[in-house]
Image (cartoon, rainbow, N blue to C red):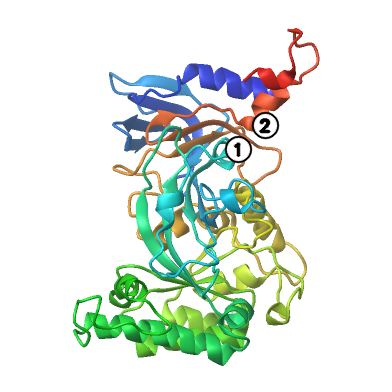
Amino acid sequence: MRWLLAALALALAIPAFAQERLAITGGRVVTNAGAPIEGGTVLLSGGRVQAVLPAGAAVPAGYRVVEAGGKWVTPGIIAGISQLGAVEVHAVDQTNETIARNAPTSAALALEVGLDPEETAIAVTRIEGVTAAVTAPFPGRTIFAGQGAIISLGEGVRSPIRARAFQHVAYGEMGSRIAGGTRPAAWAEILNALEEARRLQTGLVLPMRDQHRDLRVTRDDAEALVPVLTGAQPLLVRVNKAADIRQVLKLRQIYPGIRLVLVEAAEGWIVADELAQANVPVITLGMDNLPGRFETMAATMSNVGRMVAAGVKVALGTPDLDASFQPRLLPQYAGNLVAQGRLPGGVGLSWDQAFAAISRVPAEIFGLADMGRLAPGMRADIVIWSGDPLELSSAPEAVIIGGVAQPMESRQTKLARRYLPGQPETGLPKAWTR
């Protein structure tokens, strides 16, 4: 209740849906570009950060002051991978745009066509401090899932930050199952598709749709994979086992232009030095410590800490199906990785590393140069927290996306208010009120 009242007060101080010149003063400002600034001031104008000032600096004329004394001011959380905006109810196919089980194409599928900015989970996630998300398709008929998007969680935002932002493919146990039952089958599928793309790229296949059709790769899919070969579009590979990761790294030798990004990588710590040397980043949940599958026999809570210590760029996301609807929990996961470093024998992250893994690092992996930090010219995606954002006792009190203060309301908060004891009775069924 204390958080609710504080959030309400702060929300009243920052009217929603109004982009104006704001000065957020007095908070502990986390810039992701150096030490936190105690009592600092963040100036916002035109949807961008104009300046980050030290304690005691005068606020220029024309800025409305929002007092954040005793609170934390940070960049917004970026979900490294999720299904936000693409799934309302996973078990109901009509509301799930991530899996095309019977489509004649795969790599050519563009997820942004099916995105729904009004999806229930977006508002639920937004009021927990997540301001942007990497939304990924899931492999269906073939191991290639299609092209994912990077979306803003801002209220009323209709277009993604970046459409067709990456290509997603499965290897390991999932890939082998879809491809026919073995890893050699999955590897052959990957090479076959990329070779078809290379033939198009090099002009070996004339750009006429009726002159060539590979039995396993449609012309549309091959064309969609050309940006992967040039590095214009990262290739996200879902893989876990150390041996499988080593196999996937060979793609860099065969196709030097590819920008590989590994997803999950439960045994990444075993090959951390090789990942660092190859400069291949990882997006993972970071909370897997049980051998739930044969490919995750060496899973450990120290996976992320060991990879980061070796120099691997690691971002946190929710690639696991059970967690894919809960990117709002990313601050909790990051905090657990800080705690992991305090356990006997555990390898975790520092606070700065953990927070960067849910903000700055995913922005760097996808080349979002104006996100993930508080500095002049950056997108004004900012969260004001009641306390340390990696502590369970803290909560967002205000969320600003693109310089616009967001309503701190979701379906859950509306339901809680509807059924709160003491509400006046209208004599009508509760479902009749909205």
**Mark 2 falls on what kind of element?**
helix
Residue at 76% x, 73% y is 292
Mark 1 and mark 2 in contact? Answer it, CB < 8 Å.
yes
Q: Position of residue 161 (x, y in %)?
A: 36, 48
Question: Label 1, on which residue?
Answer: 124
Residue at 57% x, 73% y is 307
Residue 58 visible to the viewer: no
Which residue type carries mark 1? Answer: Val
Q: Position of residue 314 (x, y in %)?
A: 52, 66
Q: Position of residue 230 (x, y in %)?
A: 28, 75
Marking on residue 22: none
Q: Quadrant of residue 217?
A: bottom left
Question: Label 2, on which residue?
Answer: 412
Residue 421 visible to the viewer: yes
Q: In this orientation, which residue lies closer to the viewer: 136 or 220?
A: 220
- Which residue is the extreme one toward the front? 210
Horizontally, residue 207 falls left or right of residue 191, namely left
Q: Quadrant of residue 251?
A: bottom left
Q: Is residue 258 above or below residue 382?
A: below
Horizontally, residue 181 falls left or right of residue 194, namely right
Q: In this orientation, which residue lies closer to the viewer: 118 or 373?
A: 118
